[in-house]
Amino acid sequence: MNETMNVILTRRSVRKYTDEMPKKEDLEQIIQAGLYAASGKGGQSSIIVAVTDKALRDRLMEMNRKVGGWAEGFDPFYGAPAVLLVLAKKNTPFTVADGSLSMGNMMLAAHALGLGSCWINRAREEFETEEGREILRSLGVEGEYEGVGHCVVGYAADTLPQPAPRKDGRVFWAE
């Protein structure tokens, strides 16, 4: 089997991480994969905010926890030390699609590098708030962006789960 197909077929969402921060070079490769994702009309509307600062990571985690309605102390980022936040330009026909393709590329790249990842939702709700917009401004992000997702990244604390069986009846051929 070709290596690309192997990565696609073996990647799984990781929901328990060690504290060890991935190497910056690995995070840069993952980000590059996100930046090279296909985009509507080649517009490259998505941006990536790479968060390795623990204080900001924890602040985003807490915002996400509140949006999700979980009890205090719950970590919706599952302990992952790095968060690659994907946003895309607001009010374009491709906002969600462009950001989603970046997310998918980054999760596959993380797996190819021996790292775990998981797509965490609620970025849209976080960055619709004044606190979220202020975080972006403080990082130099200008313009109107919509949160698409958080790609949390780190070293898996457990072995990867086995894939669920694929459901039948999901492919229709028109030959």
Image (spheres, rainbow, N blue to C red):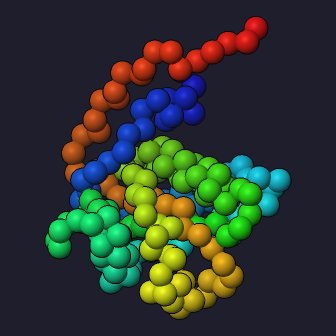
- Picture quadrant of residue 89: bottom right
Quarter of the figure with the N terminus: top right
Determine whether 58 is above or below 118 in the image: below
Is residue 3 visible to us here? no
Q: Residue at point 28% right, 51% down? A: 15
Q: Residue at point 43% right, 53% down? A: 119
What x and y, as percent, mark residue 4?
A: 57, 33
Quarter of the figure with the C terminus: top right
Q: Nearer the viewer, residue 39 or 30?
A: 39
Is residue 37 visible to us here? yes
Left or right, 42 with respect to 163, comes to right
Labels in figure, total: 0
Q: Residue at point 34% right, 80% down? A: 59
What x and y, as percent, mark residue 6?
A: 49, 29
Q: Residue at point 36% right, 45% down? A: 13
What x and y, as percent, mark residue 34?
A: 61, 56
Determine whether 149 is above or below 11 in the image: below
- Picture quadrant of residue 140: bottom right
What x and y, as percent, mark residue 107?
A: 48, 49
Q: Outermost residue, right direction?
A: 41
Q: Outermost residue, top direction?
A: 175
